[in-house]
Image (cartoon, rainbow, N blue to C red):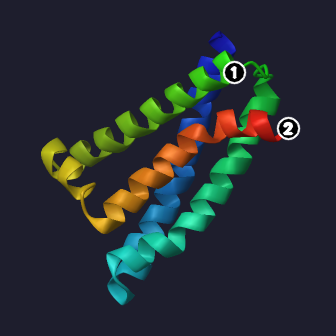
Amino acid sequence: MLVAIIAGALYAAVVFLIGFIFGTLRVMVLVPALSDLTAVLLELPFILLTSWFVCRWCVDRLGVCRSAQARALMSVVAFVVLMVVEFGLGMILGRRLVDQLAGLASPAGVIGLTAQVLFGLFPVVQVWRR
């Protein structure tokens, strides 16, 4: 089970770093030219595809077993770590937690949160696909 926890944390960290790069480009390049919603919709397939392959790499590299319990633990750890790091970074950058949570109610926020839930489910889904 320790391997699943480490894999979940690594998966979240790598995807967060990649998402930070995508998000920076989205905010600086796409949002000024398009709406926030359109920019999120354009970014979404890239971050989900990247997450899928990073998840597979973490599972294979760390040897996470195929048990439903291990993959579910990896999923929960990855989702929690991603959300904590994301909200933590927002607070470091001066956004109050209340404001960040309120942003999840916007159309772009709902889509982003849905993508984060999918990200969290990838370890479990990949067990079924293999």
Whichever of labels 2 and 1 marks the residue nearer the N terminus, that label is 1
Q: Position of residue 127 (x, y in %)?
A: 76, 33
Q: Position of residue 29 (x, y in %)?
A: 43, 80
Question: As drawn, which residue projects farthest toward the right?
Answer: 130
The answer to which of 53 and 88 lies nearer the viewer is 53
Q: Is residue 20 above or below residue 127?
A: below
What secondary structure is marked by label 2? loop
What secondary structure is marked by label 1? helix
**Mark 1: few/some/many CA within 10 Å (<14, 14-19, 20+):** some
The answer to which of 101 and 67 lies nearer the viewer is 67
Residue drawn at x 75%, y 31% as measured from the top left? 59
Residue drawn at x 22%, y 48% as measured from the top left? 101
Q: Is residue 111 left or right of residue 10?
A: left
Q: CA distance from mark 2 to mark 1?
A: 13 Å
Residue drawn at x 24%, y 57% as measured from the top left? 105
Q: Position of residue 54 (x, y in %)?
A: 69, 45
Q: Is residue 94 above or below residue 125?
A: below
Question: As drawn, which residue projects farthest toward the front?
Answer: 128
Query: Could you say which disc has been placed on residue 123 in the image?
Result: none
Tell me the kind of residue under disc 1. Answer: Ala
The quadrant of the image that shows the N terminus is top right
**Mark 2: few/some/many CA within 10 Å (<14, 14-19, 20+):** few
Residue that label 1 marks:
68
Q: Is residue 9 left or right of residue 65?
A: left
Tell me the kind of residue under disc 2. Answer: Arg
The part of the image, by quadrant, that contains residue 130 is top right
Residue that label 2 marks:
130
